[in-house]
Image: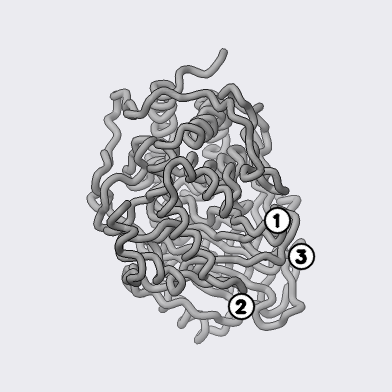
Amino acid sequence: MAAALAACGNEPDPVVSYFDADDTDWKPSPKDIAGQDTTAPADAVLADTAPDAVADTAPDTAADDTAVGSDADTSQDGTAAPFSPDIGGGLPSEITKIGTPTSLFDVTGIHTVKLSVDPTEWAAYMDGVDKPDGKKVYEWHPAAVEVDGVAYGEAGIHGFGNGSQIDNPQKPNVRIKFDHYTDTNIGPEGEKAFRLKASGQDDTFLRELLAGALLREAGGNAPRMGWARLWVNGKDFGPYQLQEAVDKRYFKYAFGNNDGDKFVQEYGCLGFDCPAKGCDGLAKAWSGDPGDTQVIVDLAKAVTAAADADLKQVLGDYFYLGELLADYAVDALLSNIDGLASAGQNFTAYADEKTKRLHIIATGTDLTFGGFGAWYDLQTPWGSPNAWCPTRADQIYTRIWQVPDLKSKLLTKLRNLQCGMFHQDKLLPLIASYKAVLKPMLTSDPVAKQSPGQVEAAYGSLTSYIKKRQQTLVDLLGACPQ
């Protein structure tokens, strides 16, 4: 801590080139995740070395979550919140078939998205996707867009992602912005934009959907998702995940207002604390729409300098505390190697126009549930610096465990997840129902990189992670009430 404060004033070195502020993912290898046990033993009970949970009995203060879209802890005694079959993002408790969708983010149906693109423009688009790791260059290209047989005029299309494109550049991620060229143009259901994700880092096509539902249940924020099949100039590119855009339309329904400032990172591996090389350079490492990024610098300095006794108040001054703790709890629970608590990226920050405090919206949670073999101790979800983000170690999460009230609230979030949606008796049947309807689509994908055996293995890894993690929660918090 002292070293970080002493270094304030120096600018951090950029970590990667800017791809898309909504999704700065890239792909590590397991050996890059230093300080972690990257392979969970098949039959071992993996205990987390954290003290027993403390019941959250302290009342929430004005600095806690009291605004629209926020989440106060749902129980004061650590028991689970009631399990809901629909977790605010179109996630039914089971799914029996894929048919015609009734809405844009209805996961019981699959949309048909057709793009008509000038062949020269499409060649340039695919060339940007096919660049090597860390050198992808994405630009806007015009395309005529049709969704479920309805034409929506000319829109802009744009690539995104890095790690999610490395293994299969022939199946591109596509961001569609309907009003890119014409301000008044809108897409289905009034949406201005959405993203088609090829799920290049998740052969189940399910991790991000589940992670988003868990975040919402815990009181955090994540865009809704559905399914689509993409056709470009008559060529079938197979199934995609259709993800809601994090824009003014999203902010309005999620938080009740949309005239606040939006902040995104220009470089990865940042988070909200001062990096080892200093604080002031953070202003250049973020972009604001339209906000002044000095807000991020002031936030980072205040959090880094705060004494433990003041940390809850300082965090509450800048964040919706329950949302922030939900993000940390879910990132740690799911061993998210590419989120806020670990790599410090793949999220958008929105400053509520009424309170000026930040809402955090997770925008890329595909490397969860043990992706790339990651397995986090719940108390230290990143560990020592590593080759992927060599200067990154989240100070906020580490310090939360040292402040009794913050620790209590974090453990309550984990307890509610443990005995709520994440409980294997609830989550595993849900996954089995999704697998039954998704697997035929995934194994018949005309441009897939994964074989049927790899899809099966990915689902096996997903369910195995949940069973093992449930045991670590029992070791940490005790069994759920019968």
Between disc 3 and disc 1, whose residue precedes? 1
Q: Amino acid at mark 3?
A: Gly
Judged left or right of residue 95, residue 471 is left
Q: Is residue 264 above or below residue 307?
A: below
Between disc 1 and disc 2, whose residue precedes? 1
Res. 104 mark: 1
Say whether residue 116 is visible: yes
Mark-to-mark CA distance, 1 and 2: 19 Å
Residue at 33% over, 68% down: 15
Q: Are marks 3 and 1 in contact (CB under 8 Å)?
A: no
Which part of the image, by quadrant, shows the C terminus?
Answer: top right
- Judging from the image, what secondary structure is the residue with disc 1 in? loop
Residue at 52% over, 50% down: 314
Query: Can you identify the residue that label 2 sits on?
Result: 156
- How far across and down, in percent of the image, does residue 224 sit? 63, 52
- How far across and down, in percent of the image, does residue 9 sit? 36, 70
Residue at 37% over, 36% down: 379
Badge 1 density bin: few <14, some 14–19, many ≥20, Cα 10 Å = many
Query: Can you identify the residue that label 3 sits on?
Result: 190
Q: Is residue 371 above or below residue 145?
A: above
- Judging from the image, what secondary structure is the residue with disc 2 in? strand
